[in-house]
């Protein structure tokens, strides 16, 4: 799990920070207890999985645990 803020994730995924925050709220993205300044810290792998599902046109799994399982199955298939 790589901790990132919405701004950091937006830069890495080529999206806006607003989009990242919307995904975080809509898909209940895994968050870390720590903060970077006043910013909330999210799990980058979880956000990247959501990005991949949207890019492929696949449904986004509803929980972080289901997204973890999807990542594991995709990694095993590669």
Image (cartoon, grey):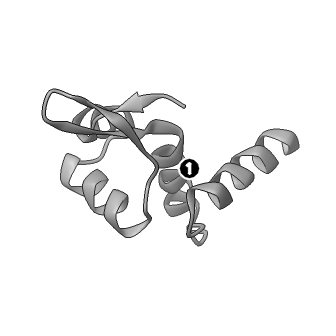
- Residue 63 placed where, x, y %? 57, 64
**Residue where numbered disc 1 is placed:** 49
- Residue 24 placed where, x, y %? 35, 57
Question: Residue placed at 36% from the left, 60% from the top?
Answer: 23
Position of 66 with respect to 76 (left or right) is: left
Question: Residue placed at 51% from the left, 58% from the top?
Answer: 55
- Residue 74 placed where, x, y %? 77, 47
Q: Quadrant of residue 12?
A: top left
Position of 6 with respect to 62 (left or right) is: left
Secondary structure under tag 1 reads helix
> Callout 1: 10 Å neighbours few (<14), some, many (20+)?
some
* Residue 50 seen from this side: yes
Question: Residue placed at 78% from the left, 39% from the top?
Answer: 75
On the rendered image, what quadrant is the N terminus found in? Answer: top right
In the figure, 66 relative to 26: above or below? above
Q: Quadrant of residue 76?
A: top right
Give the number of callouts: 1
* Nearer-the-camera pick, 28 or 47: 28
* Residue 78 seen from this side: no
* Nearer-the-camera pick, 70 or 64: 64
On the rendered image, what quadrant is the C terminus found in? Answer: top right
Question: Residue placed at 36% from the left, 38% from the top?
Answer: 33
């Amino acid at each position: 799990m790589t901790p990132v803020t919405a701004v950091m994730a937006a830069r890495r995924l080529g999206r806006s920070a607003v989009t990242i925050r919307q995904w975080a709220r809509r898909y209940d993205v895994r968050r870390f207890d720590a903060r970077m300044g006043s910013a909330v810290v999210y799990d980058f792998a979880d956000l990247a999985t959501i990005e991949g599902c949207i890019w492929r046109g696949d449904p986004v799994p509803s929980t972080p645990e289901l997204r973890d399982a999807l990542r594991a199955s995709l990694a095993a298939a590669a």
